[in-house]
Image (cartoon, rainbow, N blue to C red):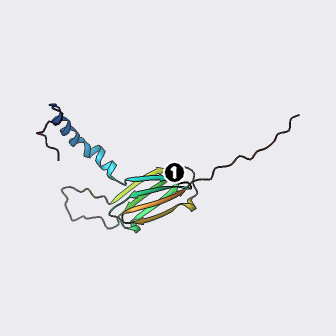
Amino acid sequence: MTNYLIKRNNSTFDALDDAFNSLFKPMFFEERYNVMKTDIRESDKSYLMDVEIPGFDKKDVSLALEKGYLTVSAEKKDCSDKNEVYLRRERSCRVSRTYYVGDVNKDLVKAKYENGVLQIEIPKKEKDIPVSHSIAIE
């Protein structure tokens, strides 16, 4: 929580900036960037992704690869609390994120879900090595 009584930069606008940021940040930024945080690494033969999906079971998570786009989604089936009235609800019952991975072989993609982290291994496509070809000159 921001303390609006302290002027950090000796500026009278600090309190106004903090109030403006805290008013709009949850609406436009916070939710978007807190869902499915992802680390992507590269090895010699593949790309490795670690996608955080805390609070979901393995049976709730699904992957789809279509036209070069990998979609990771998770949905809790038993998340409807129709009798409950929430003042604020921050935990999601459904999350989804799509990544462009290019043209990859679907059958070679591997995934493992453990402790709220989905680990995905996407093998790199082997580059076509040009075969030298001699051309006869007339």
Up-down relation of residue 30 to residue 11 (above or below)? below
Residue 102 vs residue 87: left or right?
Answer: right
The secondary structure that dominates the magenta segment is: loop
| Residue 1 covered by magenta stretch | no
Q: Residue at x 29, y 43 (%)?
A: 28
- Residue drawn at x 76%, y 45% is 132
- Which of 81 and 103 lies nearest the eye of the viewer? 103
For residue 74, what is the image quadrant? Answer: bottom left
Res. 14 image quadrant? top left
Res 82 → quadrant: bottom left
Tell me the magenta residue range.
3-9
User: What x and y, as percent, mark residue 108?
Assistant: 57, 61
Amino acid on which the number 1 mark rests in the picture: Val
Residue nearest the viewer, comparing 85 with 137: 137
Which residue occupies 47% across, 53% down? Answer: 41
Label 1: which residue? 101
Pick whichever, 5 or 27, lies toward us: 5
Q: Residue furthest left?
A: 5
Q: Is residue 6 magenta?
A: yes
x%, y% of residue 29?
A: 30, 44
Which quadrant: the C terminus?
top right
Looking at the image, the residue that sits furthest to the right is 138
Residue at position x 33%, y 48% in the image: 33
Query: Where is residue 43 shown, x and y percent of the image?
Result: 52, 54
Q: Residues within 10 Å of mark 1 (few under 14, many from 20)?
A: some
12 relative to 132 in the view: left or right: left
x then y, percent, for residue 121 = 50, 59
SS class of the residue under badge 1? Answer: loop
